[in-house]
Image (cartoon, coloured by chain):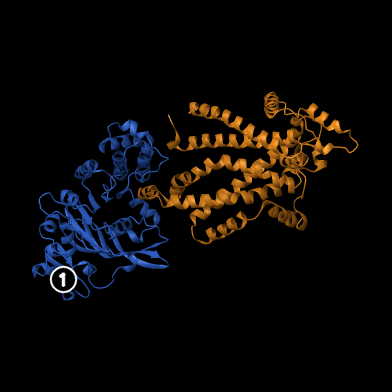
Chain colours: A blue, B orange
Amino acid sequence: MSNDTLLQIKDLRVSFRIEGQYYAAVDGVNLEIKKDEVFALVGESGCGKSAMALSISRLHNENYTQCAGEVLYEGKDLLSMTPAEMNNVRGGKIGMIFQDPLTAMNPLMRIGAQIEETLTYHTNLSRAEKKARALELLERVGMVNPALTYDQFPHELSGGMRQRSVIAIAIAAKPDLIIADEPTTALDVTIQAQILDLLDELRTGTGGSMILITHDLAVVADIADRVAVMYAGQIVETATVYDLFANPLHPYTRSLLHSMPSALTEEARLHTIQGIVPTLKNLPRTGCRFAERIPWHNASLHEENPTYHEVTPGHFVLCTCYKTFALGGGTHGTA
Amino acid sequence: MWKIVVRRLLILIPQLIALSLIVFFLAWLMPGDALRGLLDPSMPPGEMNRMREEAGLNDPWFVQYTRWVGNVLQGDLGRSLQHRVPVTRVIGDNMMNTVRLSIMTTVMLYAIALPLGLLAGRKHNKIPDKVIMLYVFTFFSIPTIVLALLMIFFFAFGLGWFPAMNAVDVRAAFEGGWPEFWSRIHHLILPSMTGAILGGTGIIYFLRNQVIDVQNSDYITTARAKGTPERRVYTHHVLRNALLPIAGGMGASIAAVVAGSLFIERTFTINGMGQLFFDSVLGRDWPVANALIMFYAVVGVVAGLLADITIMLVDPRIRIK
């Protein structure tokens, strides 16, 4: 593990119990998040992105979930920490921003109190200092009237303001890593842009890393440094943003990129990927998991046990089926 | 805040008028009247009608209604036809027993329901939850009288721990002071437990589902993600949110306890208003019955008011400016 690695995930497996049996939603993920980078995790709904994010902070209900593998934060395995150690990490080292700001805050607590709660567990500030810090945070996340917001309840704020408050909670204790799980999905488009700008600005201000989970590739292109594409619980491709957009390899990545609406092409219909992400119970556990959704499917192109191939330095892709394109074995136009 | 309370109090007025009309007509439509029970075969034929005329029972309904309301407003609920004393006195003699029973039942009710509901929710799908749910579903379907009789059979006759009837020991009541107090508590344990065990089932079930629901809500994940210790997540986030609707339902369940005392008083022969209600209905003593129905109705309406105020105090989302 190199010195500039903040978080290293080794062979992470997250399984959920369905009718008495455990099914892996995250199936053997290896990742490295470097210091000061924005790492994007993309994929369709149900690919295991959120399941993976929650397992980093161990926020799954442990009655129904099993996590195996290692999640090393600065070299220490989060998965084997005691609850007390884990509470130091949560909020203090890793801040989380969730998808739906409308439900992410306790409806019975004032915004100020919810921000101060983070400070209570991770700093030794006095009451007055905490309040001052909370007001400062509210101002930093762009609240027009921090003093007013401080005393308001979540239901008195708009969606965008609530997401700003959630961000204030997440960054209150200055964590080194922020995990943003689809932070803009529930917001309307103009607010989305503002929130993304805010996230980007906050990160460059404090110099921390961020894992950004999204299915919006435009967002990725905008602020991420590196990207991992996830499909059916596996990472199918990892690359820098530039490499991924310039030279997408895995057929799934290509399909995703191809499905982006664009003002530049003349196509009347938007490309969609055939089929749906298989449900957890029906996930193919062997071979290339995306195979059945590739219309030009040719069994000989897939590996029986897909492995990662480093095509160019830092650009990894799972399974040999990416060579389809190199071989000219099909295009999306005919798909 | 106070504006809302005042507005809510003003709503009480039409509610009470509507109630009094309903109560009056219920009694008015009941077959027979108080005098028919006094009918004597040796009475001359016109006598019955003369008595009815004298009692005002031959007047049109609105005359009877306004007379009744006018009297009620002056604190005169009429005279009991059975006991031949003012209704206020008849009820007054019995009221304290019902009040004591209701307070004791309510205390026991929440003492049982809150911890069990919270425990079941927290240990969802584990053994404590399953045991508690078994209790809930069993006792939810048992009628009051059956449980009351079982309680009497086991704890009064079998084990002899508690008295089976009456509200107080006559000797202790004569002595007064602490002996009387303890004797009353002792007598109230079985009846109030019966009410609490049965009345608690609904609250337990509701609270359990509430806890399960809140535990899986996003803001609990947020609270955990802040590094909040598990115990504090529970006390500061889950508990408050889960108890909210229970606080709102408190008025209704107190009203239910008071109304439920009807059967319990009957079975444990406690001289309370429930007992009195039975007697007055059976004896066609409509001034007493009316007054009691009116009393129960007022309890219900006031309980609703209290519930509204409570929920306004505890839930910031309901505070209207």
Q: Is residue A138 left or right of residue A229?
A: right
x and y percentages locating residue B312 in the rendered image: 48, 35
As helix, strand or loop, the secondary structure at mark 1 comes to helix
**Camera-nearest residue between A3 and A62:** A62
Q: Is residue B206 left or right of residue B173?
A: left
Residue in the picture at 18% in, 52% down: A220
B280, above or below B130, in the image: above
x and y percentages locating residue B46 in the rendered image: 85, 31
Q: Identify the amino acid type marked 1.
A: Thr
Q: Is residue A319 left or right of residue B83?
A: left
Residue B64 in which image quadrant: top right
Chain to which mark 1 belongs: A
Question: Would residue A124 be seen by someone viewing this image from the given angle?
Answer: no
Question: Would residue A46 be seen by someone viewing this image from the given angle?
Answer: yes
Residue B92 in which image quadrant: top right
Pick the quarter of the image with the C terminus of chain B. Answer: top left
Residue at the disc numbered 1:
A320
**Camera-nearest residue between A334 and A38:** A334
Residue in the picture at 77% in, 33% down: B90
Tell which residue pokes out farthest to the front in this image: B45
**Camera-nearest residue between B10 and A301:** B10
Residue A295 in which image quadrant: bottom left
**Camera-nearest residue between A160 and A256:** A256
x and y percentages locating residue B148 in the rendered image: 71, 52
x and y percentages locating residue A195 in the rendered image: 24, 42
